[in-house]
Image: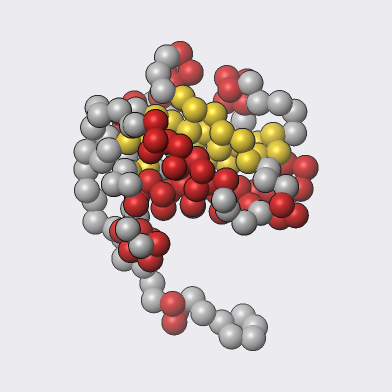
Amino acid sequence: MEVLEAIKKRTSIRKFTDEDLPDDALDKILYAGTQAPNAFNREPWEFILIREGRVKDELVSMRQKVPPQKEALKTAPVVIVVCYNNELGNEALSSTYACVENMLLAATSLGLGAVTLTFHGGKIKDLLGLPEGFEIASVIPFGYPAEFPEKPIRKPVSEKLHVGKF
C-alpha cells in the first residue's frame, strides 16, 4: 500500500479479532517507528510490548470508566507503550509522535488496526517500571480489526491553511 493510501485509509480501531499478530508484522511496525524524524537524532523513544498477563489486565482495569478504550485494550492481542526520554522536552514529545504516526501507518499498510490512547500519572509509570525522566507518549492496542468504522470527515486544507502569518 502506498503511503498516501495508508494515510487516507487509517482510522482508529477499538475492537479487534482474537487472531494473533505475526512477529514479522510487529517487527515492521516497530522498525517504521524507529525511522521517524527526530530532534537532534536523539531517538528519544522506547517501546514496551505487552501481550497478556497482569500488566495488560491492569491497563484494562485503568480504563473501566472509558468503555471503548477498555474494549480496545482487552481485545487487542498486542499493546505497545511508546514512551520517551524527556530530557529534550517538547522536542522529545514531537519526535516521539512522529514515531507513533509511522507505526500507525505501517499497521494500516499491513491490514491491521490500532488506536492511540493516552495515560498519565505515577500509577502507570510504576506499573511499567519507567525510569526517572521518562514519560508515556501513547499506549497503542494493535490487532486485526473486528470493526470497520467510517473515517471521520476532515476539514479541507483551505480552512486550516495560513500563508505568511496566522
The residue furthest front is 24
Q: Relative to 133, is 45 on the left or the right?
A: left
Residue in view at x 71 percent, y 52 percent: 41
Q: How is the image coloured?
A: secondary structure
Seen from the viewer's position, the closer of residues 41 and 131 is 41
Q: Position of residue 110 (x, y in %)?
A: 33, 47
Q: Position of residue 56 (x, y in %)?
A: 44, 21
- Asked whether residue 95 appears in the rendered view, the answer is yes
On the rendered image, what quadrant is the C terminus found in? bottom right
On the rendered image, what quadrant is the N terminus found in? bottom left
Total number of numbered labels? Answer: 0
Above or below, 41 against 134 in this view is below
Seen from the viewer's position, the closer of residues 84 and 70 is 84
Q: Relative to 84, is 68 on the left or the right?
A: left
Above or below, 80 against 86 in this view is above
Seen from the viewer's position, the closer of residues 139 and 166 is 139
The quadrant holding residue 10 is: bottom left
The residue furthest top is 54
Above or below, 44 against 102 in this view is above
- Asked whether residue 119 appears in the rendered view, the answer is no
Q: Relative to 1, is 84 on the left or the right?
A: right
The quadrant holding residue 82 is: top right
Residue in view at x 71 percent, y 26 percent: 131
The residue furthest bottom is 164
Q: Position of residue 91 (x, y in %)?
A: 71, 53
Residue in view at x 22 percent, y 48 percent: 148
Q: Position of residue 58 (x, y in %)?
A: 46, 19
Residue in view at x 42 percent, y 14 percent: 53
The quadrant holding residue 43 is: top right
The residue furthest right is 87
